[in-house]
Image: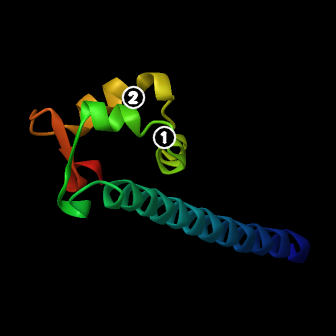
Amino acid sequence: YIAFSVLAMLNVVTGVFVESVLKSRSTERDLFMVSNAKELFQSLEGGMHANMSWETFESKLDAPQMQAFLRAVDVDPSEARGLFTLLDLDGSGEVSADEFL
């Protein structure tokens, strides 16, 4: 009975530890994505207030920040047009920093 109780307690402790690590990793990934997106917009004329057209978005596909962003959201660069359409919430043909983030 004691061995079973110890095993159960160790299982709970392990579960709490694993959950903590997964939450931490998720937070780090989110911060990494936001950082890359901000770098992309800051490289545009107008910075965080700029809008990114499809042509600009397409030209940035080879940028390391865009590559990292696409990997983080698990999107292949060949699907970039579909991602752009999804990000363009207001249908203006341009994506603002707020829409991108």
Q: Residue at x 46, y 45 (%)?
A: 66
In the foreground, 96 or 24:
96
Rendering coords of residue 11 (x, y %) = 76, 67
Give the crowd class for mark 1: few <14, some 14-19, many >=20 residues within 10 Å: some
Query: Residue 4's x, y, as percent?
Result: 85, 68
How are the residues colored? rainbow
Q: Are marks 2 and 1 in contact (CB under 8 Å)?
A: yes
For residue 72, above or below residue 75: below
Asked if residue 67 lies left or right of residue 3, the reply is left
Residue that protrudes farthest toward the top in the picture: 78
Vertical order, 88 against 80 (above or below) = below
What residue is shown at x 21% (from left), y 56% (from top)?
Answer: 98
- Circle 2 packing at 10 Å, graded few (<14), some (14-19), many (20+), is some
Residue type indicated by callout 2: Ala
Given residues 71 and 36, the one toward you in this image is 36
Position above or below: 12 against 76: below
Cα distance between the residues tagged 2 and 1: 8 Å
What amino acid type should be assigned to the residue bearing mark 1? Leu
The picture quadrant where one finds residue 1 is: bottom right
**Mark 2 or 1 closer to N-term?**
1
Which residue is depicted at the point 48% across and 40% down? 70
Indicate the position of residue 41 as horizontal and vertical percent values.
Answer: 32, 56
- Where's the C terminus, which quadrant? bottom left
Q: Which residue is the site of mark 2? A: 80
How far across and down, in percent of the image, does residue 5 sit? 80, 74
**For mark 1, what is the residue?**
70
Q: What count of labels does the image hold?
A: 2
Secondary structure of the residue carrying tag 1 is helix
Nearer to us in this view, 93 or 98: 93
